Structures are given as structure tokens and as C-alpha cells.
Image (cartoon, rainbow, N blue to C red):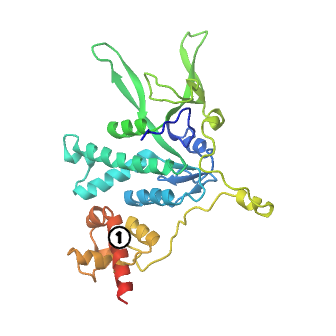
Amino acid sequence: MAIPITRGKQSGPQKVVLYGVEGIGKSTWAAQFPNPVFIDTESGTRNLDVARAPIPTSWQWLKQIVSELTKDTQGFQTMVLDTADWALRMAADAICAEKKIGGIEDLGYGKGYTFLAEEWGRFLDSLTQLSAKGVHVVLLAHAQCRKFDLPEETGSYDRWEMKLDKKSAALAKEWADCVFFANYKVFIVQDEKTKTNKGQGGKRMMYTTHHVCWDAKNRYDLPDELPLSFESVAHCFPAAGPPEPPAPPQEAAAQAEPPPVPPSTPPATDAAASVHAGLAQLMKFNGVTEKSLMAIIARNGYYPADTKLENLPTAFIEGKILKWWPKILKLIEEGELNHASNN
């Protein structure tokens, strides 16, 4: 049987990374993508009129938000993670809770960052699955400046990098179709009287190709530098996803409005308000009661079924419950189905 071969360029959703200095306008830039929804890990979009998912308070909750959007994109055509470095911090906290350590470096010899990169790689895979549903995926990140010494030479230079550890940053750059760097462009002007050089200007610019002082790439033959405005690159990111059927005249105005975002306050359960914030958030979203959760915990021999959730140690919640949340959900669902069938 012959393998089917296709030719020519293929258009589709793009995976984009934009990193830059603080306050330069990364979120504003990303908000101009087609019909975006933000996962705002640091509450940086409060002054923007955008759709946003509930703010994740744990790594597991962040992963579930992506999973739910992959199951049902709700008509959104772009997902923006704002920011990647804050999300990676959640992943590091989750690993520390699981390993019962105080910091990711406590594992020694770079093992902590290896675990972190593996977890980050799996998360990027989940974002690729979301992209396959016809959704542009945009990762925003802060930038940090490091001084590099030239090997076997005298002198050094400053280099801008994503504010991620080296392994995770490398994975993000490989994953992305486009990597852009945003910074202020300063012009050097010489004073005619004193002959001294002074920095002037500060125009916001976006760099699209690799430079010795930063990493960047694109697949659209863009100029090396552009003003930091979405109009400069809008032709690279058209509306993604399957075309929507035309709306009847009376519904056209309603469909012009952005689709609803996932509710920030899911249905209440009997979980106590003092429970670990990340766990309470997951329980509410999935409709899991304290009784059903404690039944699973008791069945596995950890704590008695009548133990209050607020009395569970934080290390147990983060290292066991949050880590194995998908499996716990499956066990709860299986138990409810068995109970219903017996009745």
C-alpha cells in the first residue's frame, strides 16, 4: 500500500513565544490575537478587556484548565499563557512537594532541573494537543539579562534570555514555531559640546531573528526587527480552527460577542473553605465532595474516612492528592457507577 504524500505549504494554528522586559506590553500584544482566552498566572491582565480562565493556584489545576480547553475550545481561537515562568514555578513547587524538599536544587547535581524539564516537556505536549484543535498557543515570558564571558578571549557581553532554567527554556524554544524578543531600542547620541555619549529614545521593538544578544526565530521571513505591534505580524496568525457556519441575521450581533469563559466560581461542594486553595479549586470544578474524596483516601490506607480535609497535611495534599488527581477522579467516578448499578 502506497503512503499518501501531500505537497505544498500548510496553514494552521501557530505556537508562539514572546519574551521581553518587564512592562513592555507583552499581554497587550497577545490580546490582539484572534479571539484569545488568557490563563493568567500572575494577575497581569486585570487592566485588559480580555476573556480569562480561572487563575490557577496549583500546577495540577493549570494542567486541568488546558485539558478542559482541549476537550472544548468554546470557540476560542487563541490561548495565551501569561506567563510561562510563573507557570514553571508552579511545576517546581509541585515537584518539591512530591519529593518533600524545600527547593528544586535540593536534589543535587542538576536532578531537580531534569525532573522539572521533564514535567515542562509533558506540559508543552499538552499545549501541542490544544493547538491541534485549531487554536493558536501563545506563551509569554519575562526576560533576564546575563553576562557571558567569551571563551579563550578577553571581554564579555550581555545576553537576554527567557526567565526559565536552561533546560526548560531550550524545550520552549524548540516547541515554538516563532520566538520573539521584545525590548526598548535605545539610540546613542553624542553631545556636541562634551563629546560624551548619551542614550535616548526607548521605542518598543520586537526582534524576530537570532542575535548574539538574544534568541529569536520565525518562519515567515520577517524583518530582523519590528515595532512591538500586532499589526506587524497579524498576517502570520489568521483566525484558526474550522470555519463557523454563517449566523442568521437576528443572531449575528450575539455571535459577534466573545464566547463565555469558564466560570471562575464553579458549583459549590461541601469542602471546607479552609481547605488547601488548589485542592478546593479542583474539587469545585469537578464537583467532588469531601466525603467521596476522603473515601478514596481511606480506602488506600492513608487517613480515616472521617478525617476533615482541613486537617490533612499540606505535603500530603500537594505530594499525593494533587499529583494523582486524574487517577483519584477516575476512582471516584468508578465508585459512583458501581453504586448506581447495584441500586
Location of residue 204 (image quadrant): top right
Position of 305 relative to 66 (above/below)? below
Q: Is residue 275 left or right of residue 21?
A: left
Farthest-out residue, right: 249
Q: Residue at 61% of width from left, 62% of height from top?
A: 260
Q: Which residue is nearer to you in this view: 205 or 222?
A: 222
- Quadrant of the frame with the C terminus: bottom left
Q: Nearer the viewer, residue 281 or 223?
A: 223
* Residue assigned mark 1: 330
> x, y percentage for residue 12?
56, 42
Side of 56 where 205 appears, left or right: right
Q: Residue furthest front?
A: 1
Q: Amino acid at mark 1?
A: Lys
- Residue depicted at 45% across the width and 47% down the height: 128
Residue 327 appears left or right of 162: left
- The spot of residue 118 in percent (x, y) is 31, 46
Visible residue check, residue 300: yes
Look at 33% across and 49% down and name the residue there. Answer: 119
